[in-house]
Amino acid sequence: MTDLDIAEVAQRAGVPASTLRFYEEKGLIASNGRRGLRRQYDAGVLERLALIALGRTAGFSLDEIAQMFVPDGPPRIDRQVLAAKAEELDRSIRELGALRDSLRHAAACSAPSHLECPTFRRLLEGAVSGAVARPAKRAPRSP
């Protein structure tokens, strides 16, 4: 199989070359060496990058994703970890849906003031008590 130049991998994967170098430093991907000053990768790196992108989209940290990869061989993706992440996403969807519905109500409410709207008051009370979900802070994206 032909090696791919770092620029070609970056273009095909839709990430900057700096991200590829960062992933390599973290041990998520490995280059096959260099041709001149440019890193070369096996074409299989594209599948690994797709798995990383999917994991990041699902909310996994790079460290969690790294645990799914073994040095030589296919990824070890724990089905229980996937199920737990799906449950976490379900909770977030429910919380965000309730928040969305409350905001829509407040936007259309006929009360003279938002502070006179019982639904908006419950939303305020939930925000103070922590019952209203704040968006989860994600680990910063790699360069």
Image: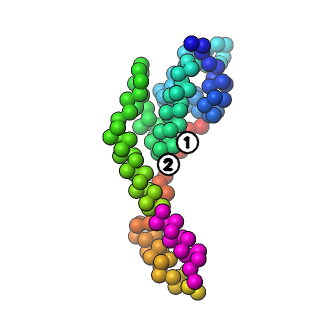
Give the residue type that dot 1 points to. Arg
Majority SS type along the magenta span: helix
Chain part drawn in magenta:
97-110
Q: How crowded is the residue under tag 1: few (<14 C-alpha within 10 Å), some, or many (20+)?
A: few
| Frontmost residue, 103 versus 22 | 103
Quadrant showing the N terminus = top right
Q: Please name the residue shown 47% across and 81% down the image.
A: 118
| Frontmost residue, 4 versus 93 | 93
Query: How far is disc 1 from disc 2 in space, using C-alphas?
Result: 8 Å
Q: Are marks 1 and 2 in contact (CB under 8 Å)?
A: yes
Q: Please name the residue shown 40% across and 47% down the image.
A: 86
Q: How crowded is the residue under tag 2: few (<14 C-alpha within 10 Å), some, or many (20+)?
A: few
Q: Within the magenta stretch, is there residue 50?
A: no
In the picture of the structure, the residue carrying the numbered disc 1 is 141
Q: Please name the residue shown 38% across and 41% down the image.
A: 82
| In the displayed structure image, the side of residue 70 where residue 24 appears, left or right | right
Can see residue 128?
no
Vertical position of residue 53 compared to residue 92: above or below: above
Give residue 138's mark.
2
Secondary element under disc 2, as helix, strand or loop, is loop
Vertical position of residue 109 compared to residue 92: above or below: below
Q: Percent position (x, y) of residue 69? A: 42, 28
Q: Percent position (x, y) of residue 13? A: 60, 31
Give the residue type that dot 2 points to. Arg
